[in-house]
Amino acid sequence: MLAHTHVPDMGQTQDPDASLKAAYRPLRVPVLMIAAHGPEYPIVFANAAFLRMSGCSGDEVLGQSWRSIVGEHAEPEALAALEASLKAGEGHDAEFLCRRSDGASLWGSLSVSPVRNEAGRVRLFIVTMTDIGATKQRERLLEEQLEQKKVLLQEVEHRVKNSLQMTASLVLLKARRLKSPEARKVLQEVAERVGALAAVHRLLHGSSDSGRFNIRDLAAELVGELILALPEGQVELSLDVQPIAVPASKAAALALLLNEAIGNAVKHAFPDGRQGRLTITIGRMESDLAITVEDDGVGLDHAPPPEGSFGKTLMTMLAHQLKGRLTWHDMEPGTRAQVVLPIGAEETRFE
Amino acid sequence: MSSEKRLRILVVEDEILIALELESLLQDLGHDVVGVATSSAEALALGQEVKPDLAFVDIHLADGPTGVDVARQLAARQGVTVLFMTANAKRIPEDFGGAWGVIAKPYTERGVREALSYVMAGKPREPQEERTVTFLPFGVTAREGSPQAS
Ligand SMILES: Nc1ncnc2c1ncn2[C@@H]1O[C@H](COP(=O)(O)OP(=O)(O)O)[C@@H](O)[C@H]1O
Ligand SMILES: [Mg+2]
């Protein structure tokens, strides 16, 4: 015998689901029951919590197709998927924009469970609904805020780059107006250093991962610019740089360091049209990152360092900041500057 | 440079320091800067008046982010070859607004040189040994219908 015969009669005699309905009626969770009769799958029960949420009376709901609970904005694919589950007699979870009787809509999370009779046939579906409007609202708000932050970040990047551009322009404009070659040279060096910092910003903001940059791109960019100071063909350039990802926090120091080392070779190693070769090697050396700039030019000691020279001092300072070791070798002929940096866990190989 | 042709160039840039420095650089490279505009209206008026071969166009101008429109009009109506020069390349539309390429700011002398030789060659060269990050050509498909500097 079926269990329902033991449940007090609720007025509708012979309802095989009376006991289920009695159990769901007082629940605080909105619950519907849908008859397993396609194609309409009519609503045969709605508890008070559901009626409160939907703003409908029982008469407005009962007998209507299950589709009447979702709004007209529901995605057709989502509706079709739910319908397919009903047809197959399977459970289903989905989120829908549902319609309230007052025309307002609400986001509902629907959970559909089939109920089978003793013969194993699905006789109805129980649908529980949760109002997830607040969650959706929060999601939307977060998305909006994220979008705003992205725009802001872009704006800041834009301003950084523009300011660096203006700094370089300012210095170069002044340099162009000076008669003294010494003074011009000093200002051009300042602009070059600003340019090295600018290269970092271009590369960082161009890459998908703003937290890291590829040292190979940086080296290629800097040497490409610095080599312009020499007439084409005078010095053969050889670049052997591994694609290694370095954290953005080290980018500025590395860029300035490379700029000084390469700049020195370009400016001092090959005077009076001297031919030669400039080799830049960056790669791993055991647990270190080794950066080597080598030329076969006139050598460090070809002349006493001029008054006020700063490049080599700057390199020492930067190597220190990066916790690295800077060494100079007389290659007879030529000069080799090498910086060996401890390679952190953050540094990784690209690809 | 491969070509001795002097290009007549219009600079559209609202930061006067940048415009002046770029002007000096272009002159050093053997070209004539025939005008400097800081707003979209000024750019279009100057375009009509001086008929430049080439225009360097920033995206942010004195009257807002109007550079893309300026590029479109200069290219389509006035037959000017356009290069963007901007720190905000993300603003460039998918069809490139009729421009031939973009020079990223902060620009480098090499970026400007490459852009000029690209324009003077009149057609894209094969992807090069090492590409600069400062100049990015848009390629042929992007600029169909946009005239050549000649
Ligand atoms: N690669 C090199 N080849 C030959 N001489 C060099 C090289 N690097 C540096 N020097 C010499 O060392 C001097 C000091 O260099 P630096 O401190 O960078 O100052 P600056 O480059 O301003 O002269 C240079 O003036 C030059 O004489
Ligand atoms: Mg130096």
Image (cartoon, helix red, strand yellow):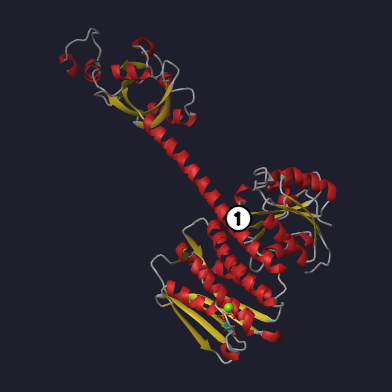
Is B40 in front, or is A76? B40
Residue A330 position in % (x across, y down): 53, 90
Exactly how many numbered labels are in the figure? 1
Question: Which image quarter: residue A323?
Answer: bottom left
User: Looking at the picture, does residue A306 appear above or below residue A349?
Assistant: below
Question: Which image quarter: residue A284?
Answer: bottom left
Ligand 1 lies in quarter: bottom right
Establish whether ligand 2 lies closer than 8 Å to the Cβ of label 1: no
On the question of residue A255 being in view, the answer is yes
The crowding category of the residue bearing disc 1, from other C-alpha atoms within 10 Å (few below 14, some 14 to 19, many at least 20), is many
Residue at x 38% of width, y 17% of height:
A42
Is A67 in front, or is A291? A291
Q: Is residue A164 left or right of residue B67?
A: left
Residue A286 position in % (x across, y down): 41, 78
- Report the chain holding disc 1: A
Q: Mark 1 points at which residue?
A: A162
User: Looking at the picture, does residue A337 appear above or below residue A24?
Assistant: below
Q: In this view, does A13 lie to the left or right of B13?
A: left
Residue at x 50% of width, y 78% of height:
A313
Q: In which quarter of the image is the C terminus of chain B?
A: bottom right
- Mark 1: which amino acid? Asn
Residue A262 position in % (x across, y down): 58, 76
User: Looking at the picture, does residue A317 appear above or below residue A164?
Assistant: below
Residue at x 23% of width, y 15% of height:
A18
Q: In which quarter of the image is the N terminus of chain B?
A: bottom right
Residue B55 position in % (x across, y down): 76, 53
On the question of residue A241 being in view, the answer is no
Question: Which image quarter: residue A167?
Answer: bottom right
